[in-house]
Image (spheres, rainbow, N blue to C red):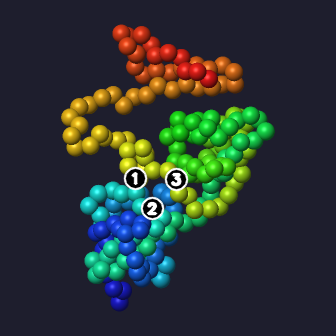
């Protein structure tokens, strides 16, 4: 008879724990969870049953209800390594275009790593990037307003206001740039065109 799955109700962030007795290998998408059945490296079934949805990072851990600690390990997955090519695109420009698509991105000194996506790969190649398929752990940057995914933000518990989260963005089609705006600038005027 199988023993019931042990529940995990607590996340321990990397560096705050020691002594894991097991580990769970999860890809980027699987590390975003609230309630999920997981299988450890030793074949043990556990259930993450957390109070809120969290983004688990490589090196975090789950504390099971019996006190056991299970380490979170980022699995290798199919990625695209994006680097400046001979077409003139520099890292800053490539990073801007990837970020403008709200795409998870691992930023390194000589390359950017993104999940495989033929549309994004063609886009950055069109900007002059070299794209190389790789299989590695994916450890993208967290959000600008704290750790985890880039899913939106708030301004903390003291903030008592609302604002429009629409955004403006430019599109570069070769040498022709056009600008989309979801709202107007000061005094009803459209915002200025971006410098490209």
How many residues crowd around disc 3 within 10 Å: few (fewer than 14), some, or many (20 or more)? Answer: many
Residue identified by numbered label 2: 57
Give the SS element for disc 2.
Answer: loop
Q: Which mark is residue 140?
A: 3
Query: Is residue 101 shown above or below 74?
Result: above
Q: Position of residue 8 (x, y in %)?
A: 31, 72
Residue nearer the viewer, 147 or 182: 147
Q: Quadrant of residue 37?
A: bottom left
Q: Position of residue 91 (x, y in %)?
A: 65, 41
How many residues crowd around disc 2 within 10 Å: few (fewer than 14), some, or many (20 or more)? Answer: many
Tell me if 161 is positioned left or right of 176 in this view. Answer: left
Residue nearer the viewer, 129 or 45: 129
Q: Position of residue 189 (x, y in %)?
A: 42, 10
Residue nearer the viewer, 188 or 158: 158
Q: Quadrant of residue 175?
A: top right
Give the SS element for disc 3.
Answer: loop
User: Quick one: label 2 or label 1, which is nearer the N terminus?
Assistant: 2
Residue at position x 74%, y 34% in the image: 88
User: Quick one: label 2 or label 3, which is nearer the N terminus?
Assistant: 2
């Amino acid at each position: 008879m199988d023993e019931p799955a042990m529940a995990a109700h607590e996340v321990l962030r990397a560096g705050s724990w020691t002594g894991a007795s097991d580990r769970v290998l999860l890809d980027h998408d699987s590390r975003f969870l609230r309630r999920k059945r997981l299988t450890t490296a030793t074949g043990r079934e556990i259930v993450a049953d957390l109070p809120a949805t969290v983004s688990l990072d490589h090196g975090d851990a789950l504390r099971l209800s019996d006190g056991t600690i299970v380490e979170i390990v980022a699995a290798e997955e199919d990625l695209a390594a994006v680097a400046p090519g001979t077409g003139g695109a520099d890292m800053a420009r490539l990073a801007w275009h990837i970020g403008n698509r709200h795409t998870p991105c691992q930023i390194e000194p000589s390359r950017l790593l993104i999940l495989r996506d033929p549309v994004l790969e063609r886009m950055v190649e069109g900007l002059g990037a070299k794209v190389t398929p790789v299989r590695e752990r994916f450890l993208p940057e967290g959000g600008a307003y704290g750790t985890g995914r880039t899913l939106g933000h708030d301004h903390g518990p003291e903030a008592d206001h609302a604002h429009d989260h629409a955004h403006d963005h430019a599109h570069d089609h070769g040498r022709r740039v056009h600008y989309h705006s979801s709202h107007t600038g000061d005094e009803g005027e459209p915002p200025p065109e971006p410098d490209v």
